[in-house]
């Protein structure tokens, strides 16, 4: 993956994700093939912060119906990144 933005797809915009901002935990949708190390390096390069911890999880897509037709949303990967105490990602703080 060439740039940090190939790894980090977008921030997760949810109440639960916003709740972690006070503790220095930021949640991102990441590329399905991204490793913990790749996520850590990408966040450090993109936002100029020190990353202390990275937790990743695979999120299965939900089944959705439209009348008699059934489909499935795509599977995704989510990463919860903890930054060093006293630091924060300014770009995401304004989204609240």
Image (cartoon, rainbow, N blue to C red):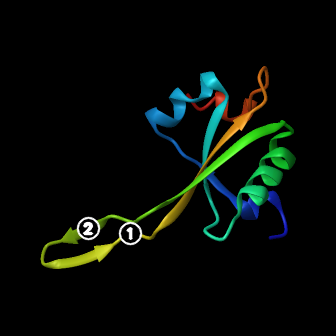
Badge 2 vs badge 1, beta-carbon distance below 8 Å: yes
Q: Is residue 73 above or below residue 45?
A: below
How many residues crowd mark 2 within 10 Å: few (<14), some (14–19), many (20+)?
few
| In the foreground, 74 or 67 | 74
Q: Is residue 95 above or below residue 27?
A: above
Q: Residue at x 52, y 36 (%)?
A: 17
Disc sitting over residue 73 in the figure:
1
How many residues crowd mark 1 within 10 Å: few (<14), some (14–19), many (20+)?
few
Q: Residue at x 77, y 37 (%)?
A: 52
- Across and down, in percent, residue 47 comes to 81, 41
- Across and down, in percent, residue 21 comes to 61, 28
Q: Is residue 70 left or right of residue 2?
A: left
Label whose residue precedes the other's in the sequence (2 or 1): 2
Q: Is residue 38 above or below residue 40?
A: below
Q: Residue at x 79, y 29 (%)?
A: 84
Is label 1 in a helix, a strand or a loop? loop
Disc sitting over residue 37 in the figure:
none
- Across and down, in percent, residue 68 comes to 12, 78
What whole-number distance in Å separates the C-alpha atoms at marks 2 and 1?
7 Å
- Kindly identify which residue carries mark 2: 64
Q: Residue at x 67, y 28 (%)?
A: 24
Q: Is residue 24 left or right of residue 51?
A: left
Q: Quadrant of the N terminus?
A: bottom right
- Across and down, in percent, residue 90 comes to 74, 30
Extreme residue in the bottom direction: 69
Q: Is residue 5 above or below residue 92?
A: below
Q: Quadrant of the C terminus?
A: top right
Is label 2 in a helix, a strand or a loop? strand
State the image quarter where residue 35 is shown.
bottom right
| In the foreground, 52 or 91 | 52
């Amino acid at each position: 993956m060439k740039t940090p933005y190939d790894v980090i797809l977008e921030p997760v915009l949810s109440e639960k994700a916003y709740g972690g901002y006070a503790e220095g935990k930021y949640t991102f949708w990441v590329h399905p093939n991204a490793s913990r190390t790749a996520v850590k390096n990408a966040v450090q390069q993109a936002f100029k912060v020190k990353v202390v911890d990275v937790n990743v999880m695979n999120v299965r897509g939900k089944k959705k119906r439209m009348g008699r037709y059934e489909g499935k949303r795509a599977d995704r990967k989510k990463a919860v990144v903890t930054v060093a105490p006293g630091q924060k990602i300014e770009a995401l703080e304004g989204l609240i």
